[in-house]
Image (cartoon, rainbow, N blue to C red):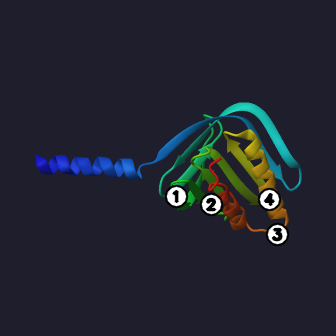
Amino acid sequence: MKKILFILTVCLITNLTFGQKTEKINGNTKFSCSQKNGLTETKSDYVLTVSYDTENLKFSTAEKQQMTSYSVAKKTEKYVIGKNAEENYSFYDIKKKQYYYIDYYMNRYMTAGYGSGSTEIKQAVLKMMEMLKNGKSQKDVIQYLIEQTKYDF
């Protein structure tokens, strides 16, 4: 009996420690910035759903929308970095509840940001695009976002 309880306890702790976390964040403005069209602000209430574990990072901004999926490149207590098959990156700031991604398609970049803190997200999306236009890589942009997690004010 003790062995069964021990095994169940270990399974429960493992599941809680390594299980998938899902967060729902209310937002009111979606930001995207493309090299061709510049910044687009879409003002509407939405729920950002972010799910992550040690292997996958997924997000969606609509309830019935299929979640966009990335493989986890790095996960810490403060953030999760995802990378997809096309070598595009995404970044989730766990504490600030902000999600960003970069898309490179047909020789053009697009950056986008969702979550809480509209003004901060807007500035980050613009900064991300500025860095890409100035020849920085997607990894450089992700490094910039990592640096932003160090500031707790």
Tag 1 residue? 76
Instruction: Point out residue 59 in the picture as x, y percentages from the top left corner.
Output: 60, 46
- Whether tag 3 and tag 1 are in contact, CB under 8 A, the answer is no
Nearer to us: label 3 or label 1: 1
Nearer to us: label 4 or label 3: 3
Nearer to us: label 1 or label 2: 1
User: How busy is the neighbourhood of tag 3: few (under 14 within 10 Å), some, or many (20 plus)?
Assistant: few
- Whether tag 2 and tag 3 are in contact, CB under 8 A, the answer is no
Q: For residue 84, which quarter of the picture? A: bottom right
Tag 3 residue? 135
Tag 2 residue? 84
Instruction: Point out residue 52 in the picture as x, y percentages from the top left corner.
Output: 52, 50
Three-letter code for the amino acid on which mark 3 is drawn: Gly
* Viewer-side residue, 2 vs 66: 2
Q: Which residue is drawn at 81% across and 50% down?
A: 33
Q: Label for residue 44?
A: none
Q: Is disc 1 placed on a helix, strand or loop?
A: loop
Instruction: Point out residue 36 in the picture as x, y percentages from the top left corner.
Output: 89, 54
User: How busy is the neighbourhood of tag 2: few (under 14 within 10 Å), some, or many (20 plus)?
Assistant: some
Nearer to us: label 4 or label 1: 1
First in residue order: circle 2 vs circle 4: 2
Tag 4 residue? 109
Q: How far apart are marks 3 and 1 (CA)?
A: 28 Å
Three-letter code for the amino acid on which mark 1 is drawn: Thr
Is 113 left or right of 21, judged from the image as shown? right
- Whether tag 4 and tag 1 are in contact, CB under 8 A, the answer is no
